Image (cartoon, helix red, strand yellow):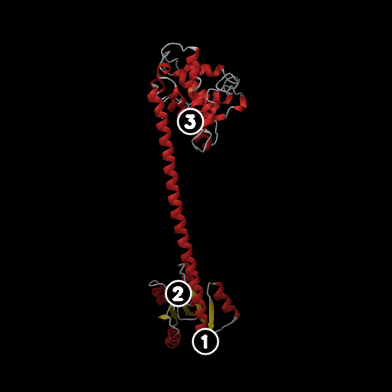
Amino acid sequence: MARVLVVDDEEGLRDTMAQFLARDGHVCLTAESVEAALVALAGDPVDVVVTDIVMPGRSGMDLLQEMNALSLRCQVIVVTGEPTVETASDAVRAGAFDYVPKPVSRARLTQVVAAAVRLKKSEDENDNYRENLERLVESRTGSLNASVERLKRTLENTTQALSAAVEIRDLYTAGHQRRVARLAGAIHQKLGRGADEGAGLRIAGLLHDFGKLAIPAEILAKPSRLSAIEFALIQQHPITAWEILKGLDFDWPVAEIVRQHHERLDGSGYPDQLKGDDIRFEARILAVADTVEAMASHRPYRPALGLDVALEEISRGRGTRFEAEVVDACLELFRDDGMELADD
Ligand SMILES: [Fe+2]
């Protein structure tokens, strides 16, 4: 069963065709011209249009073109008095489904319309299937994106909370980790390295002194020089942090970067006395950012040394203790780009 529009200027033929099709159970609309057909097509959807080609005024071929322009999704069958190969092929080229020669036989008409209806129905089913699939993919993608966003927020909040924990304990490093993370991120960006590596570096920066939680507060806040034992305890903090962070399933080697942030290129750092390429690049950036921030800021055992002294220190270690290109990027940030040490 389908909705069929019959377009013919000859009233007799129009009604005959409509009766043939109605007997097959189709709902038939009729129109005596292209204009009237377009009005009918603007109403409820039609599955098949059966149109005469030669009519006073605009022809069946014009109707076909109008329908194409409007992207109407229905099959068109042309009825032609001169069933030549050219007429048929012209009609099919213009998008018609098939043609019916005049005089119109009931058998040919119902057979061609039935085939057009089958094609239209299967196209509709395909469209519905595709639309459903698109809706499904869209809703799944939407909820997946929402989950990823939620996870990212959770990770960010957790990192901030862990970062804040050590700062509550150790007032003097309050803000230190955030400023180091920010500076390390800026150096990383200046070097034009990948955004994914930058994301891991930022988290490592925010947590790099996390291991200080295990150091007695009196030692952290001690206003005088540390004894050898106290200094050895302080030197444990990258390992303590690594022990805790290695159990967390980050997408980046956060625990390793944190463990290596006091390593120096020439092997003079701690805790593993790593050298050169054995130190992760992120850790080489963190080492420079940490040194600059720590020296430029106030410490329990000394007042702030200032940014100039901090930059001199990394320049002195350029290529020996500190990675040369990282030092250069850091100097450029402060000297040419107007960078300032600040929290996020
Ligand atoms: Fe540290």
Amino acid type assigned to the residue bearing label 1 in the image:
Ala
**Tag 3 residue:** 244
Q: How far across and how far down the image is residue 239, in percent?
A: 51, 25
> Which is nearer the N-term, disc 3 or disc 2?
2
Image position of 146 (left or right of 104): left
**Tag 2 residue:** 47
Q: Separation of disc 1 and disc 3 at Cα?
A: 83 Å
Q: Is residue 339 above or below residue 227?
A: below
Q: Separation of disc 2 and disc 1 at Cα?
A: 20 Å
Does residue 33 appear in the picture of this structure? yes
Q: Quadrant of residue 315?
A: top right
Circle 3 crowding by C-alpha within 10 Å: few under 14, some 14–19, many from 20:
few
Q: Is residue 192 above or below residue 1?
A: above
**Tag 1 residue:** 107
- Residue at the spot x=39%, y=74% of the render? 39
Residue placed most toward the observer, 90 or 163: 163
- Closer to viewer: mark 1 or mark 3: 3
- Closer to viewer: mark 3 or mark 2: 3
Q: How far across and how far down the image is residue 250, in percent?
A: 50, 37
Residue placed most toward the observer, 208 or 112: 208
User: What secondary structure is marked by label 2?
Assistant: loop
Say if disc 3 is inside 8 Å of ligand 1: no
Q: How far across and how far down the image is residue 333, in percent?
A: 49, 25
Circle 2 crowding by C-alpha within 10 Å: few under 14, some 14–19, many from 20:
many
Circle 1 crowding by C-alpha within 10 Å: few under 14, some 14–19, many from 20:
few
User: What secondary structure is marked by label 3?
Assistant: helix
Q: Find out whether the residues at labels 2 and 1 contact each other: C-beta distance under 8 Å.
A: no
Q: Separation of disc 3 and disc 2 at Cα?
A: 68 Å
Amino acid type assigned to the residue bearing label 3 in the image:
Ile
User: What secondary structure is marked by label 1?
Assistant: helix
Q: Find out whether the residues at labels 1 and 3 contact each other: C-beta distance under 8 Å.
A: no
